[in-house]
Amino acid sequence: MSEQKNPKKTPVVMQVIPELGAGGAEQGCIDMAAALVRSGAKALVVSHGGSRAHEVARAGGIHIQMPVHSKNPVVMMQNTARLKKLIKTHDVDIVHARSRAPAWSCYNACKGTRARYMTTCHAPYNIHSDIKRFYNSSIARGERVIAISHYVADYLRENYRIDNRDIRVIPRGIALDRFHPTAVTPERLIKLSRDWRIPDGASIILLPGRLTRWKGHHVLIEAMADLARKDIFCVIIGSDQGRAAYRRELEEDITVRGLEGRIRIVDHCNDMPAAYMLTTVVVSASTDPEGFGRVPVEAQAMGRPIVATDHGGARETIIRGETGWLVPPGDAQSLKAALEEALSLSPTQRAILATRSMAHIAAHFTIDRMADETLNVYAELLAEKYTGTGYLHRPEQTGPLNLRTAAE
């Protein structure tokens, strides 16, 4: 029997994520809090906190601190009780889990309540054992499961037998008002160029991404050595996040190959749009497939040539031969060849590529599109909750469904 609807009730959506720091999942959570508020809903975000927690309040949402980052079974059980209390206190309609550990707590907290449970799967998590498979399954138990790419959706279908009707592929979106060439002032470019001590007249190759082995830094360093061009300067942006030994390994590799003056590792960059604007070619050299990958999308939005590895989400965000290059993972020679092609583009060819790239991103990978499609998923669940019938978003519809009227 369906629940009696209450048209006057403000929809309440509670997103749960481990922490609110840097990262695509965290950005999407904050963006959706803002979109929910704009749609007339109440937005709750539960996390352990982090440098960006204040952005939830700035967007009009409510942030609640809780140790949902913990994988300790006892803490996870305690989180279940805490979340269940929040569901009842705020009369939560939808609980949206964005990571595996908190997903277990959310899944169990929704039992015996009126709240609907959904998840977002951000990556193809490794499955090394039956125990790992079971642990990962929390993200696949949602009444709706958002996959951030078709690659991730295939992973879910192959490993967890999710019905196609319950999967929604919604790519991440970026803010075009921030990631656009006209949004970057000359002063920002000058400052960043000075901070990085970039040699005058050098072509710049940029690899953004935290310092972890699977990001492919060694592959780029080898390709740089093989290029043997002194007019190229490479910047690797990324914190080692405690992996000091790996950073030393990279620095030793740079030294052994005689590239000390041509490659610089920068811990962090607070102005990525300016970083892209300074760049001649952007590289994403991940040796393991990424669920989505923001770097190729951001680079294209800024009109910059992108060379990425030919697997995972990059295949869905780069138009091969039109907006960028896709090369085999771990193949320094192929990466070198693609870099040579990108570096040899004439001004006219670069302008054509930039136009194609920017149009491609504007059509498919914006925050507005991601928010609209996610709001549609919320509306489906609200309609099912209050009417007992689905409210599926039809391809011909444009814009988000109204959360307040979804149950009417």
Image (tube, grey):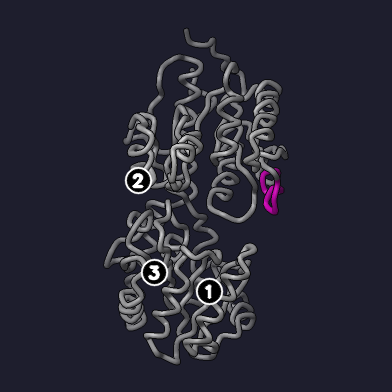
Q: Front-most of 103 and 400?
A: 103
Residue 355, above or below 261: above
Amino acid type indicated by mark 2:
His
The disc placed on residue 150 is 2
Q: CA distance from mark 1 to mark 2?
A: 29 Å
Seen at 48% across and 74% down, the residue is 206
Left or right position of 143 against 159: right
Look at the numbered disc 1 and give the secondary structure of its residue. Answer: strand
Real-space CA distance between mark 3 and mark 1, rounded to the nearest whole angstrom: 15 Å
- Give x and y (percent) for residue 358: 40, 63
199 vs 129: above or below: below
Determine contact: label 3, label 1, CB under 8 Å. no
Position of residue 367 measured from the top left corner of the image (x, y, whole percent): 49, 49
Residue 50 colored magenta?
yes
Residue 300 image-quadrant placement: bottom left
Instruction: Point out the stretch of residues depicted in magenta.
Output: 49-57
Q: Which residue is mark 1?
A: 236
- Under mark 1, the amino acid is Ile
Total numbered labels: 3
Disc marking residue 306 = 3
Q: CA distance from mark 2 to mark 3?
A: 21 Å
